[in-house]
Amino acid sequence: MNSITMSLNADELILSALREDITSEDITTNSVMREYRLGEVDLICKQDGVIAGLDVFKRVFELLDSDTKILLHAKDGDLVKNSDKIGIIRGDIRVLLSGERTALNYLQRMSGIATYTRSITELLKDSKTKLLDTRKTTPNMRIFEKYAVKVGGGYNHRYNLSDGILLKDNHIGAAGGVREAVQMAKEYAPFVRKIEIEVENLEMLQEALDAGADIVMLDNMSVDDMKTAVKMADGRAETECSGNVTIENIERLVDIGVDYISSGALTHSAPILDLSLKNLHTV
C-alpha cells in the first residue's frame, strides 16, 4: 500500500480506529508513564503465515507521533515463522503503549486474510482459475481486507457498488427476469462497463448468454451443471462460480474450467495471524 493510497484513503480510517480506542486519554498508560521516555518494543510473530499490513501497522504509530521509528525485517507477502522478530518500534513509550492494540488489530487481521488466501491459491496454482474476493468485508475495513487478499495471491472483485454491475437474484426479480435485467443494464450503464449476472440453473444461463451478459456467475450449482455451463458459455461470456466456497471444499471446483472462483470466506472467515509486541524497554 503506497504512501498516496495511505494518505488519501487509509489515514482517515486509521485515525477513526484510534479515536475509537482513545476517546480522551489512555488512562492506563498515563498512570504509569507521566512524561516522555524513549523506548523500544519488538514485533514478534507467534505462528507461521503470510504477513500483510506492515505499512498500516507503521502508520498507526506515525499518526500518533511522527517521530516514531519502525525498523522492519519483512515485507508484505513474506512468509513468516513462529518466533520470528519482524520489526522494532522505537519512540515515546506512551505512543508505543497507546498504539499497540490498534496497530496489531490491523496487522493480525490483514495477515490472517493473506495467509488464508495464500493457502487457497496454492490449491488452484495448476489451473487457469483465478480466486476472487467479494464485498463481504468488515465495515470500514474493505480497503485493508481487499489489499490483504491481493498480498495473499488472490484478485479483487468489484470494490463497491459504484465499481461494477452485478445483477443478483433480487435485481433479476426487480427487473422481471434475466433478459430484462441484462437489457436494462446495457441501456443504463456506460459501454465500458462489463455486465455480470448471477444464474442458478442452466435455463437462466442460456437466457443470460442470449441477452449478451459479459460474465455469468454460477451460483450454488452442482459440479456437473457447472461443467455443462462452461461448455455452454464457450467464450461467449466469462464464467465465475460462487456459493459458500471455503478451503475445505474448493478442490472439487479446480477442474471445472471456470475463469473465476469467488469466496466471501477470504474476508469474513479468515482467522487472524497471531502477532504480538513484546520486550518493551527504555533506551
Image (cartoon, rainbow, N blue to C red):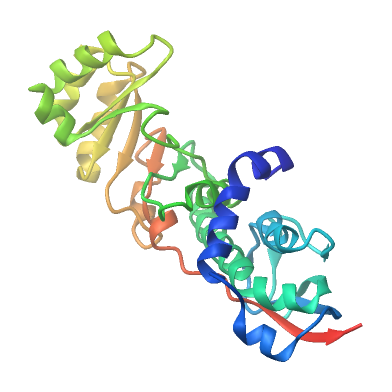
Asked whether residue 99 is in view, the answer is yes
* Above or below: residue 236 compared with residue 196: above
* Furthest residue toward bottom: 32
Q: Nearer the viewer, residue 138 or 218?
A: 138
Q: Is residue 281 above or below residue 38?
A: below
Q: Nearer the viewer, residue 211 or 34?
A: 34
The image position of residue 50, as x and y in percent, is: 63, 62
Residue 231 vs residue 212, the one in the foreground: 212
**Location of the C terminus (image quadrant):** bottom right
Give the position of the N terminus as an image quadrant.
top right
Residue at 53% x, 69% y: name it.
23
Q: Position of residue 94 (x, y in %)?
A: 74, 77
Farthest-out residue, left = 176
Q: How many marks?
A: 0
| Residue at x 85%, y 81% (from the top left corner) | 37
Residue 102 shown left or right of residue 241 in the figure: right
Q: Is residue 134 above or below residue 183?
A: below
Q: Is residue 203 visible?
A: no
Query: What x and y, as percent, mark residue 66?
Result: 80, 58
Question: Which residue is found at the position 39% from the left and 44% from the top?
Answer: 134
In this image, 85 relative to 100: left or right?
Answer: right
The answer to which image quadrant residue 205 occupies is top left
Residue at screen point 49% across, 36% down: 128
> Is residue 227 found left or right of 99 in the rendered image?
left
Residue 98 location (% of width, % of height): 66, 75
Residue 154 in the image: above or below residue 115: above
In terms of depth relative to the viewer, which is nearer, 180 or 56? 56
